[in-house]
Image (spheres, rainbow, N blue to C red):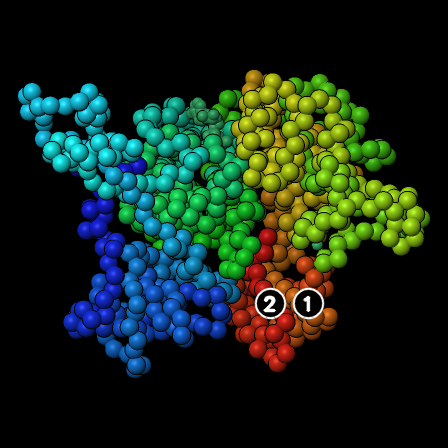
Amino acid sequence: MISSPGCRSISRKLAADGRTFHFDPSRARSIVAAVPKVAQVEPITTARVLRGPFDYVCPGGATVGSVMTVPFGGRDLLAIVTALKDSSEHELSEAKELLPFSLPEDLVALGPWLADEYCSTPARAYSLMLPPRGVKERSVQFATAGRAPDEGERLTANQRELLATLPRPAGSDLAALRRLEKRGLVVLEAQSQRRAPQHSEVGKPSGASGPPLTSDQAAALEQLLTAVPGEQLLLHGVTGSGKTEVYLRAAAEVLGSGKTVLVLVPEIALTPQIISRFSERFGETVAVIHSKLTPGERFDEWTRIRSGEARICIGARSAVFAPLSDIGLIVVDEEHDSSYKNDGDPRYDARHVAARRATDHGAVLVAGSATPRAESWQRLRRISLPMRVDQMPLPEVEIIDLRGASGSLHPATFQALVDSRKSIVLLNRRGWSNYLSCSSCGYAWECPQCDVTLVLHRASGSISCHHCGHRERVPECCVECGSVSIARHGTGTERLESELPGKVFRLDGDAADAGVVLRAFEQAEEGILLGTQVVAKGHDFPDVELGVVVDADQTLRFPDFRAEERTFSLVTQLAGRSGRGSERGRVIVQTLTPDAPALVLAAAHDAPAFLADELARREALRYPPFSTLIRIICSSPQAGAAQQAATEIAEQLPGSLGPAPLFRLRGRERSQVVIKAEDRRQAVEAVNLAVGRVAKAAGRKSVAIAVDVEPQ
Ligand code: ADP
Ligand code: ZN
Ligand code: ZN
């Protein structure tokens, strides 16, 4: 069989995993006479009360991890086989169909674990692990050479040309090729064709093994390769210190030893560079998984990983469930990034799941960052890359005291922007103004669904809610008193754009066109990249001279124990984006609190000192990693119901904080209870019990309860 890029022989696959096998109950009776007879399954449903396992007649060929459809309460549900056994005390139904793919056993075991860790259900956990539903393999007719033409055999010019271009997909020449097939000159065969993700430049690996390592990189690699199976390490290295090169080398070694590699990165749209570097070095064996893939692409990548055809998987959060076998290395790049935490149920943290998979597989886990989390700093063995590969000194960070200044840009900041060819400016507020109020009566425009003010977007002529998307036309006069004097408060990126000198590339956290804006900025000779915190994430622009944090207090004041860490990280990451070419970079941080330790230590590029302080503070206040936080949010459209449910939950959980009302969101009142626990498992169990009881109480239909273990 001659193979071409992206094509595999279907017949081989059919034999290997029984792709078109449909369960036939009439045949099954004889098959199930052999052990095992009973399959324990977990049906895939979002209902919390339907919790398996349930017993069914085991179809022939089913194993732990098999996926089948089963009749369940009058409908058909997808179900995962979690165990096989010889007998059952129940009367058994038969499965309807055995699907042509299965979960590996370690993922089957991970389901209930995930449910316990995050107060969810195994079914919800499994639905994260399965490939997309209803997707079929795509096949094309592929032509290869048959017998050689006899001497003097009659062939048209076109036919000669077709024969000269074999092997290849039939494409639009299918009819002509069929005629040649009849004469035995061509063999046509259906082949499955991979739907390759568009942006992944898979192709031939360059074969290059990368530049010679610096001595720091070599030492880091050595530590990774000699780590004990299951060990977790923290690679602390400033941006540009060559962390990715270390991952690449470690991956090559691990592949060479016959094992596989999982690489987790923050949102893919913002970090295309790491994918292309892996693809360049390793070619087709790299599979990419993230939320922007079409279902077909996702299915194909999943299948390539499951079959062992792809042995490196790179992806965002959800890739932590990639069906890799025998993982030798797990990389968590930019481990401080908050996108590793899932927003929906199960509210898993991919970093925590990655650690569990590393333990299961005996894989070495390496978490990399210039600004590691306090948790990782304390828990993991540290390796450090203290210098940039290019030997450039880190940029100089100036703190500018904004007290007494007017306007959102200090004159010194403005001048620095004028003097720099390319700059990045960070302001964590979208829109023109935060809110509008009536200058006569004080009325403020708020969202009718959420208790928040509406943000002015001047270009679209609207005021809108950043929580639910509610939009209104910009008001011409006050709805209360009719006054036409309306004040605009605060500055967002839209307004700042109009105040900046020179060409501005605005990036507003909408990842859909982020790639386009970033490429335009990259190619520009000069200009300013302006945006919310996405501008501080892993882009690699060689020629940025200046970075500006317009309002550092905005993140510092955020009511959350991670506010300091986030601010330190933001300033340090932005510093990492500037001065990567030949010029030393410069960073300006504008603030009303110039003495805040997070800012002073970020300016001194002193992560170890910052993290030591931060850990001491958290220990004193019993915050993670010295405790586990669990947040329970009750919400209801019915007045008072959420607060009532939260009160009952708090009463059952001694030592909990709350209930505390939160702002109304999408027409639902909300109230939260927070628990700081010594023992995570015990606390999760107690919460499950309390939530279960309160949810069952009469008249609670309107209350939704969400549990978030280790909220971000
Ligand atoms: P990080 O992941 O820490 O930001 P990278 O691995 O991306 O760092 O390295 C930064 C730049 O330096 C990249 O352009 C990379 O190709 C280059 N680089 C990395 N290691 C070396 C090396 N040993 N010699 C020369 N260039 C290197
Ligand atoms: Zn008014
Ligand atoms: Zn709203």
Q: How many neighbours does mark 2 have within 10 angstroms: few (below 14), some (14-19), or many (20 or more)?
A: many
> Which amino acid, by three-letter code, is at mark 2?
Ile
Question: Camera-side residue: 683 or 695?
Answer: 695
Q: Residue at x 13, y 36 (%)?
A: 182
The Cα–Cα distance between marks 1 and 2, rounded to whole angstroms, is 13 Å
Q: In this view, does 293 lie above or below 239?
A: below
Q: Residue 82 in the image: state x and y as whole percent.
A: 33, 66
In terms of image quadrants, where is residue 85? bottom left
Q: Residue 398 in the image: state x and y as whole percent.
A: 71, 28
> Which amino acid, by three-letter code, is at mark 1?
Pro
List the residue tagged with mark 1.
Answer: 637
Judged from the image, the secondary structure of the residue bearing numbered disc 2 is strand
Q: Do the residues labelled 1 and 2 touch (CB within 8 Å)?
A: no
**Seen in the image, is 520 located left or right of residue 197?**
right
Question: Camera-side residue: 403 or 659?
Answer: 659
List the residue tagged with mark 2.
Answer: 705
Q: Which residue is drawn at 79% across and 34% down?
A: 408
Question: Camera-side residue: 585 or 88?
Answer: 88
- Decide which of tag 1 and tag 2 comes sooner along the chain: 1
Q: In this view, does 177 lie above or below 479?
A: above
Whether residue 69 is visible = yes
Q: Total number of numbered labels?
A: 2
Q: Residue 630 in the image: state x and y as whole percent.
A: 59, 62
Q: Is residue 302 above or below residue 170?
A: below
Q: How many neighbours does mark 1 have within 10 angstroms: few (below 14), some (14-19), or many (20 or more)?
A: some
Q: Residue at x 25, y 53 (%)?
A: 19
Question: Camera-side residue: 45 or 417?
Answer: 45
User: Quick one: quadrant of the N terminus?
Assistant: top left
In terms of image quadrants, where is residue 632? bottom right
Whether residue 275 is visible = no
